[in-house]
Amino acid sequence: MDEIRLDTLLYEAAERQAGYFSARQAQQAGFSKALLSHHVKRGRFLRIRRGVYRLAQFPEMPHADLTIAWLSAGEKAVLSHESALLLYGLTDLLPAEIHLTVPRTASRRLPGVRFHVARLTPEEVVRRQGLPLTTLPRTISDLIRSGVAEEWVRQAVQQALARGLVTEAALEEEARRRGGRVAAQIRAALGNAHAISE
C-alpha cells in the first residue's frame, strides 16, 4: 500500500477524533511500528501517551483528555456518567475522574479514569464530537444509580428537554426499563421540568 493511501486512511480515522488516533488504528490503516515511529521523529505525529497520538496539524481541542482516555482504554470503551453529561453540554463542572463504561474489567488501570462495567446495547451508544458516549437517557440512569444529587439530575433533565437533546418519551421509556429509584427520580425530574415550563 502506498504512503498516500496510508495517510488517507489514518487521516479519516483521526479527523473524526479531533486529530487523535491510537497505535491500533494506525496499524489498521497500514502503519508499521517503524513507520509510526518515523512520523513521530519527523514531527508529523505527536506522541501523547503510550499508544495514543495526534496529527501535528490538529490543535489540541477542549476535552482532549476524554479522547485520550477513550483511545487508551480501547475502542470498546464508551464515555459515560459525568463525562457523557459534559459532552452533552449539560454541566459546567469538570468531573474529578473520566468515566468510561466497558463490557468487562479493563486489563489495565488508567490514572484519572473510573471504569464502570456494563454491557451496553448499540441503541444505548451515540457519537458526539467523534466520541462514543451513552445516550442521554442511559446517562441520566447511570448518574442516578451512581448516587449523584437529585438536584443535578433535575437540572440535567430540564436543560436537555429545553434544548431538544432528549424527549420525554425517551426518558419515560428509560424509567420503565430501569424501575425503582431510577424511575422515581426520572419521573420527579420530568414533573419538575413541567412545573418550570408552565
Image (tube, rainbow, N blue to C red):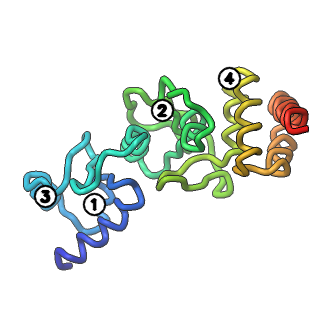
Amino acid carrying label 4: it is: Val
Report which residue position mark 4 lands on. Answer: 148
Report which residue position mark 3 lands on. Answer: 39
Amino acid carrying label 1: it is: Ala
Which quadrant, please, contains the N terminus?
Answer: bottom left
Left or right of 138: which side holds 114? Answer: left
Real-space Cα separation, disc 2 to disc 4, in angstroms: 15 Å
Task: Tell us which disc is closer to us: 1 or 4.
Answer: 4
Residue 120: x, y in percent? Answer: 63, 48
Real-space Cα separation, disc 2 to disc 1, in angstroms: 24 Å
Disc number placed over residue 196 in the picture, else none: none
Whether residue 186 appears in this view of the structure is yes
Give the residue drawn at x 54%, y 36%: 83
Pointer 2 or 1: first along the chain: 1
Tag 4, which secondary structure? loop
Q: Quadrant for residue 140, please give it.
A: top right
Disc number placed over residue 26 in the picture, else none: 1
Report which residue position mark 2 lands on. Answer: 98
Counting other residues with Cα less than 10 Å from the Cα at mark 2, is it few (<14), some (14-19), or many (20 or more)? many
Relative depth, front residue between 90 and 33: 90
Residue 195: x, y in percent? Answer: 90, 33
Which quadrant, please, contains the C terminus?
Answer: top right
Relative depth, front residue between 95 and 111: 95
Pointer 2 or 4: first along the chain: 2
Q: Which residue is the extreme one toward the front? A: 198
Tag 2, which secondary structure? strand
Residue 89: x, y in percent? Answer: 58, 41
